Amino acid sequence: MRRLTALGLLGAAHQLLQPGEALAPYAVIGLVILLPATWLPTRLVLIAGLVGTVASVTLVSGGIASIPGLFLLGLGVARLGVVHTLDRRTGQLAAVLTLAAPAAAAAVRRQYTYAPAGPFATRIAAGAGLLGALAYATALLLLLHTRLGRSLSAVLEPLGRMALTNYITATLAVTAATPLLGLRGSARWDIAMLLAAGILVVQAFLSRWWLRRMRYGPLEWCLRSVTWWSIVPIARSLTPAA
């Protein structure tokens, strides 16, 4: 409860710099839906998650509406311990990718050929985004089980462990750079993409550097301390083991 409340307050402050950010909705939906769902059977959680996710892109237009279903699917999958058996599921991941990749490509093509003002435009876009995310996630998981896996993990793991800090600092960086680069109200997507890539590279190096010295990212540490309502040790011990 404290963790989600703190996340919601941080998200509310973040909204001032980035309207439409994700933390506040995550916190509210976590309190209203995810927390009560922890008392439900796993099968019911998975069914509700699947129905909610499909409904979010077929009946409405995705976005915030897709969060409850995805949260419930995540809870159900976590309960089943799937994350701990991914090394034995490469065949299943490949099957999902084989289905998701062409479906995502078809959805994206339909998105760009469908009239932008059409009644189903936003739903098609939401479906394309969801299928694209599924294809991306399964492709990445498969890559992590190849020879490239160790190198990818070395880059992605620090970024993931400091995801909250990186999310907020990226907003601060973009907010500071926008007037300098003349991006406000601009359609210069090339400059915006270069800025995003630059921020990501810097964050990858800084995250790795920080976590060599500290157990958690700065905001991750704050959130953990609020969750446990005590100051959690953050510095790594520099004393060599005996």
Image (cartoon, rainbow, N blue to C red):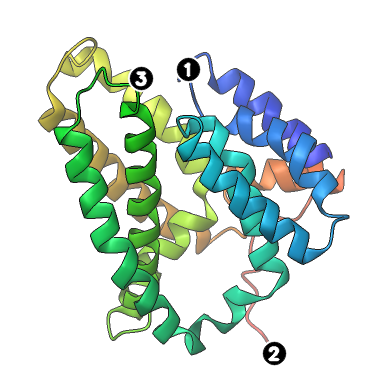
Around disc 1, counting alpha carbons within 10 Å, would you say few (fewer than 14), some (14 to 19), or many (20 or more)?
Answer: few
The Cα atoms of the two marked residues, 1 and 3, are separated by 12 Å
Q: Residue at x 48, y 22 (%)?
A: 20
Q: Position of residue 222 (x, y in %)?
A: 70, 41
Q: Considering the image in quadrants, where does the N terminus appear?
A: top right
Relative to 92, say whether 218 is above or below: above
Relative to 239, say whether 170 is above or below: above
At label 2, which amino acid type do we have? Ala
The Cα atoms of the two marked residues, 2 and 1, are separated by 51 Å
Q: Nearer the viewer, residue 217 or 111?
A: 111
In this rendering, would 124 be left or right of 11? Answer: left
Question: Residue tagged by mark 3?
Answer: 175
**Secondary structure at numbered mark 3:** helix
Q: Position of residue 180 (x, y in %)?
A: 20, 15
State which quadrant residue 141 falls in: bottom left
Q: Nearer the viewer, residue 34 or 131?
A: 131
